[in-house]
Image: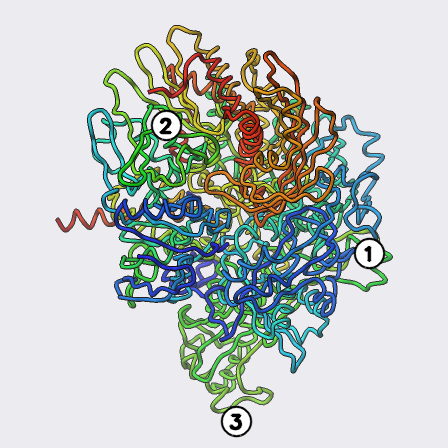
Amino acid sequence: MYVRVDERHRVALTLNGRERSGYAEPRTQLCDFLRHQLGATGTHVGCEHGVCGACTVMVDGRATRSCLMLAVQVEGRRVETVESLSDEDELSDLQRAFREHHALQCGFCTAGILMSCHEFLGRVLEPNEAQVRDMLSGHLCRCTGYTGIVQAVLDVARARQNNRQETP
Amino acid sequence: MHSEVSLYQDPQHAYIGKRQPRVEDEALLRGLGRYADDLAVLPGTLYAAIVRSPHAHAVVKQVTIDAALAMPGVRGILTGADVKRWASPFPVGVRQPMEHWCLAVDKVRYVGEPVAVVIAEDRYLAEDALDAVKVEYDILAVAIDPETATHDDASILHEAVGSNVVNDRHFSYGEADSAFEQAEHTLSLKVRYPRSACTPIECYVVVGQYDPAEGGYDVMANFQGPYAIHSVMARALRVPANRLRLRTPPDSGGSFGIKQGVFPYVVMMGLAARKVGAPVKWVEDRLEHLSGASSATNRVTTIEAAFASDGRVSALRFDQLDDCGAYLRAPEPATTYRMHGNLTGAYDIRHLQVRNRIVMTNKTPTGLNRGFGGPQVYFALERLMQRIAVTLDIDPLEIIRRNLVPSQAFPYRCAAGALLDSGDYQRGLELGIEQGGLAELRQRRDVARQAGRHYGIGYTVAVEPSISNMGYITMAQTPEERRRAGPKNGAVSTATINVDPLGSVSVHISSTPQGQGHRTVAAQVVGEVLGLPLESIRVDVELDTGKDAWSIASGNYSSRFAGAVAGAVHNAALKIRGRLKAIAAQQWQVPVEDVVFSEGRIQTADGEHSTSFHRLAGATHWAPGTLPQGETGGLRETAFWTPAELTAPDDDERINSSLCYGFIFDYCGVEIDSLTGRVMIDRYVTLHDAGRMLNPQLVDGQVRGAFAQAVGAALYETFHYHEDGSFASGTLADYLIPTTMEVPDPHILHMETPSPFTPLGAKGVGEGNNMSTPVCIANAVADALGETVEPGAIELPLTPSRVRTLMGIEEPPQPEGVGADSVSASAGGGSKLSASDSVEIPASPQQVFDSILEPETLKAMIPGCHSLELTGDNAYRADVTVGVGMIRARFDARVELTDLEPPHSLRLSGAGKSGMGDATGAATIRFTEIDGGRTRLDYDYEVTIGGKIASVGGRMLSSASKMLIGQIFSRLSQQVSGDRIKGSLWQRLRGLLGKRGGDA
Amino acid sequence: MKPAAFDYYRPTTRREAIEKLIESGEDARIIAGGQSLMAVLNMRLSQPRVLIDISAIEELRYIERRDDYLAVGAATTQAELAEYASLTEEVPLVASVLPWIGHFQTRNRGTVCGSIAHADPSAELPLCLTTLGGEVVLETKRGKSRRVVGSDFFQGVLTTDRQPHELVTEVRFPLAKAEHRYRFQEVAMRHGDFAIVALAVDIGETEYRLGVGGVADRPVVTSISRDVDLEDALNALAWSLEAQDDIHASAAYRRHLVREMGRRLITEETAREETDDVRPSR
């Protein structure tokens, strides 16, 4: 794959389970492409240098900073953003737990945090608080003081664990 | 883990006072929030990028835009000249000849100050053209430290003022002088409070439009208020207020005061749109935000107490020097006066003297920041109380207790005029001690200390003001000036409730929330009054100054929502209810008192008559002819509310600076790691009395959020400026916002003494911990470190390095011949670096000296030199690409050889500009002949680096400069002798250790 | 904060990547995970003409145990190495260091070789490589390659021995020696930040190899014989690094940590920092 500096390349990918495509230059950041080309504005941009974590999305199932990737790099890959987490009717268990625990205020950092939690909870089935805090340390939240977020994640992990035990 | 001591549990209330998940969350969790950068823009919208000053202080000689205008996609460039033509400077809060424009017009006064706006087809293209805007600067001396900036010989920022001190006021209440004379003890403490900011994760966003037909501006921005600043913007744009339509988006990604500072950009983007005849959108990036947005005011305070041997304080003296940065931007100097009425804190101290000075320095202008003015005051006051305790050898808590405002004294008029509305501070103290587990914490301290560990307990009490008196800002003026200008006071809040023909209820509030959940609480209040389910009420918080009810106190600041806005909502709902009651009473022929509202129905108390809310409300639209006489039909009510207690400052300079005063009692235990100096918070207890709590869950959310920010201010965050004014905290890797790993969960306690002055008895609660927590942690650290540490040296942020240094680092001597002779980066490291080094070159001094004077050798010496052109006697212009690793920039440089003393010494100096920043450097080189016709070349160099690279690359600048300078001399040697030499540091290191480090 | 324009090239073989590198020289930058480079590009501190993305080169995505070392290919992410099942037995130092590198979201994309090629003086993997005496494999045209030992590879701030036409294709971490122990400790401002001081030690029978990151302009390793006075040796080491003040920590503080943390690490005194740093303070 070679895209020249002045070329607008049609990038095709699977976004939240749907085939999508849009135009990007080589230098177009993935976050800009998702937000302004594909309209997935649920992903937010907070620092563009990989520290704040607000722009975190999943690329091929892995939580990734979308400010530290180029749009052309997701050609042919699978991207999930916050918009994928719930269906029309109902919030996911994770989203509900965030609401219940007042784990968001302005909500700007929340999309990225949810995506990290989503990957983490799929991988670490019985996390302790230290693990949850370590996972969340890649995100900056200025509103909540993090308590509600930590509690929400631990709650979801416990609930899923109970569900697994009930339905062997 | 909070203890849920909700004393207000009135079972009659359906919603108020109840924990209630937020109506905002569903959309936000789905990624369906509509933040400023998410909103669709008009076709043809262009995008802005801003040329910013790399210098802290310089005259702008010339701005050349031709090359930039010719770049692809560039559609226009707004400069100071345009701004002068179309706009005016912003009005300033003190009477001084100072001008602040939205773009620099004559000088730049801080790193990051906007100089020009490039407007292009997209942001990428706009940024491409930034470096092509050529700005010629004449660099001036800087004033950075607030104290030295006050000196006569300091560089002056605003020449017409004649001094950097732009405001100097003295206040005296009671008989402070005689109290000090008669006191058994006096104690003085000088403290410095640093710069930091609550730094929202969403940066500024502005979309400007200009309508030449109406001569008006229409701007969408994530501005937070206060809308008093709408007047400031309209005046700067030279339009009546009705020709500046300012709109805010439905959602905001946090603010904490900081998005007040978006207002100069509202003006700038309005003008940019006018320049290009198209809408212009600007999204601030993080580098712009950290260097150029806003900051809390740093302060130097000398505080002095007169007190008796029992610890009772009779008088206080404050000398506050506030550093508001390069411009006094509205509403400054409000930081200085927000706390003025309650400077005596939670204490009953009748005699008070205050001197307040405002000083300008070459830093980013300051502005609103959560806790506004509070952390600075309490840091001085509560550190002083801790010192009094230590001096008298009395428990600090006992000192606090003996000085608190007595329980029966409320409402209590403070010396400087604050009317403490309600409270029971003594009971708060008892509650906090018992329920927070102080006894156990003291045991933990004893155990830790017995084991030789560094453990301390800190205490703080504070009053948390909320609902600012718009008149307090005029305290910067003399009574005479205030009389001439006319009185300013009050805090008008508004709310509108509309009931549509189908009977559904919409609420509009002008509080511009930034995540606090105003929509939820407003719905709770309306649901309560009208007996409606929450889901049926829609609350709109977008503000459009062209259409909505608003006033100068609108917006999101001074924790005014719960007390004032929710109160206005309550009043508007009461108006609606009153009208509906009258209608029902007439229809049913019952007394109005018998009509009640609940569960979506309107009925008589005895249940005889009943109808649905929507049916009766709908009648006001569908059947106005059936309504009682005097009832106008339609159902929409706007309530304006302002408290009578917020009067203008009086001639004795007393000011009730806020309407409500909550109470906070905090204490914490910290342990300091003896190896690293890291401060670890073992337990933090915070008790709040914020009057009646409208939604305890949201109250706790506010407390936790403020606490986390305060932990940042106490231990991690600061905006660091070097002595030359360069800015060193330009990324989130250097401006250190705490993460989950650094923020413990505070133990939250509540009590409720409702405010008699607000409609619902509620007070603000969102800022308290920003005020109380930094000093509480500092007091605990002081307790842990003990008496060996000079009290004024306890400065924030208490970083591991700072704390460990306070504990004393006993260094074994530097072994002979190891490491550099002098460790040399300037204090605090960073942009100005000086060092010495030497190389040996296998040629005679004369040979080496002569070859440096040859242009060919010089060109070969300079790494990455593409061309070297003679411009004068031993003076050159050079085109140089300089870099380390992946970081690289092309410099337009001048190189000069001076002070030639062949073959003994010369001076090599250079200065270069690039898009990445500026660099200047000079090296004095001495040539000494050593054995065998060789030369030892000793050089002392000094390098100053400014602009972007200084603000983002601080961690590596010193080493990178050293390496690049080393390369110059290594290339010289190579040029003269054909040999390449290795860096001397590594030879010395390897020599010392006798091994080649790293051999496998 | 948008990158300057560049060509983007994503080859699928190392040969294609190297050919392009040779053709473009200093005008090209290699991007693998991009977790350092993308921030630098966004800030326009680097403005390459062409970006060569090696992340799709499958032949460079491997972790292989060979003879006495563990080889990690240039497209392998830090997360993949962390998930390598026998890492703790084979290269325990690297296993203990990985959780300290950035955050899991950056380790998901950041590569092992990329961190080493970037040569940040505070970074953990260069410190490990240097301390263990590992090697970097550099390849240029027609399979011509050379190996450089870590302490020679790192030459200064962000500066390595890699020539413009060379691609870092692999790094090699020596396998743990049975009788040795390996320890790592770091002090950073916040969890996941660049180290103010990072220490790695290989404790052998006759000597300690102590690596120091975050102080000098590159990771520095020194061997300290068990026969010499440890405190003197650490003091000499601390001064030799020519620590600098910066906005986060003073030079004297850094020297203090090299001496004190070094002594505790080597003598295996349990330092509080080690346990406290992986949990929140409370």
- Amino acid type of disc 3? Gly
Which residue is tagged 1? Answer: B97
Spatial CA distance of label 1 from label 3 is 62 Å
> Can you tell which quarter of the image residue B713 is in?
top right
Label 3: chain letter: B
Label 1: chain letter: B
Which residue is tagged 3? Answer: B625
Which residue is tagged 2? Answer: C150
For the question of whether residue B437 can be seen, the reply is: no
As drawn, B532 above or below C132: below
Q: Position of residue B182 (x, y in %)?
A: 83, 29
Please rate how many residues cluster around mark 3, counting C-alpha atoms within 10 Å: few if below 14, some from 14 to 19, many from 20: few
As drawn, C68 above or below B721: above
As drawn, C30 above or below B936: below
Spatial CA distance of label 3 from label 2 is 91 Å
Q: Which residue is farthest left?
A: A168
Question: Which residue is at a point 41% across and 72% down the rendered structure image?
Answer: B536
Q: Position of residue B318 (x, y in %)?
A: 75, 39
Tag in front: 3 or 2: 2
